[in-house]
Each structure stands twice: as C-alpha cells, then as structure tokens.
Image (cartoon, helix red, strand yellow):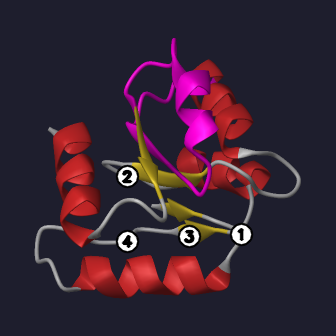
Amino acid sequence: MIVDDDPTVRVTLARFFALHKDLKVVGEATNGRDGVELAQRVKADVIVMDARMPEMNGLEATEQIRSLGINTPVLIFSAEDGVAGKINGLAKVGFLTKHGSGPRETIAAIRELAS
C-alpha cells in the first residue's frame, strides 16, 4: 500500500514494485487521513507512507492506524532526515529518505519489514 500526496512518487513506486513478482500494490492514498481509511479496508503486508502530507501527516496516520489495532509494518518514506528521530516508540516502523535511498534499499526495507 502506498500513501503519498505526490502523484509522481506514487506512480514511480507502483511501477517499480510491479517489476518484482513478490511485490504488489494493493491500494494507494493521497493523504494520511485516506491512508488510515485504506489501511482498514485492504490487507497490506507493508504500508509505504510519506511523512509530510496534507490533512494528516504520515506519523499521525501511523499512530491512528496503530490505535485501531492494525499492526501492519509501515515504511516512512520522507524527503527529510529529521523525521527518523520521530518514529521512535512506534512498533514495526522503518524509515528511508526519498533522496538518499535507491531502489535496492527501498526493496530491502520493504522485504525486511514484511518478514
């Protein structure tokens, strides 16, 4: 599942994931609030979540998802390094920077969280 307000990021990730037979995008959302709703409707093995989005940021959305009893691992994907320190205390949450992580790191992080 991909939650990101940037359509280019969503399309790029979805196309990249489609190249891997063990990865499938089961849903997309454009903001944190819609991401929380989507997490309740679909069964995802991992949620790739942008940190900064309108209506509800990725950290708030992750906290809400957890408060609903949904323990799906979340990969916070952010353009800002400073977000990494804010995920401490959130169970099953990983972090990657959008600009500092390549395709191999992204896939490895998703697979690690899914295992």
| Disc 4, SS | loop
- On screen, residue 91 versus residue 39, left or right, reads left
Q: Which mark is residue 25?
A: 4
Judged from this view, the residue extending furthest toward the top is 89
Task: Count up the numbered dots.
Answer: 4
Mark 4 and mark 3: span between their CA atoms? 8 Å
Q: Is residue 13 above or below residue 112?
A: below
Which is more N-terminal, label 1 or label 4? 1
Magenta extent: 68-93
Quadrant that contains the C terminus:
top left
The quarter of the displayed image where residue 29 is located: bottom right
- On screen, residue 11 versus residue 80, left or right, reads left
Mark 2 Cα shell of 10 Å, populated few (<14), some (14-19), many (≥20): many
Is 53 magenta? The answer is no
Tag 2 residue: 44
Is 92 magenta? The answer is yes
Q: Residue at x 35, y 48 (%)?
A: 46
Position in image of residue 73 (x %, y %): 38, 36
In this view, the mark in front (3 or 1): 1
Which is more N-terminal, label 1 or label 3? 1
| Disc 3, SS | strand
Position in image of residue 51 (x %, y %): 65, 48
CB-based contact (under 8 Å), mark 3 and mark 1: no
Tag 3 residue: 28
Which is more N-terminal, label 2 or label 3? 3
CB-based contact (under 8 Å), mark 4 and mark 3: yes
| Disc 1, SS | loop
Which is more N-terminal, label 2 or label 1? 1
Looking at numbered disc 4 in the image, what kind of residue is underneath it? Val
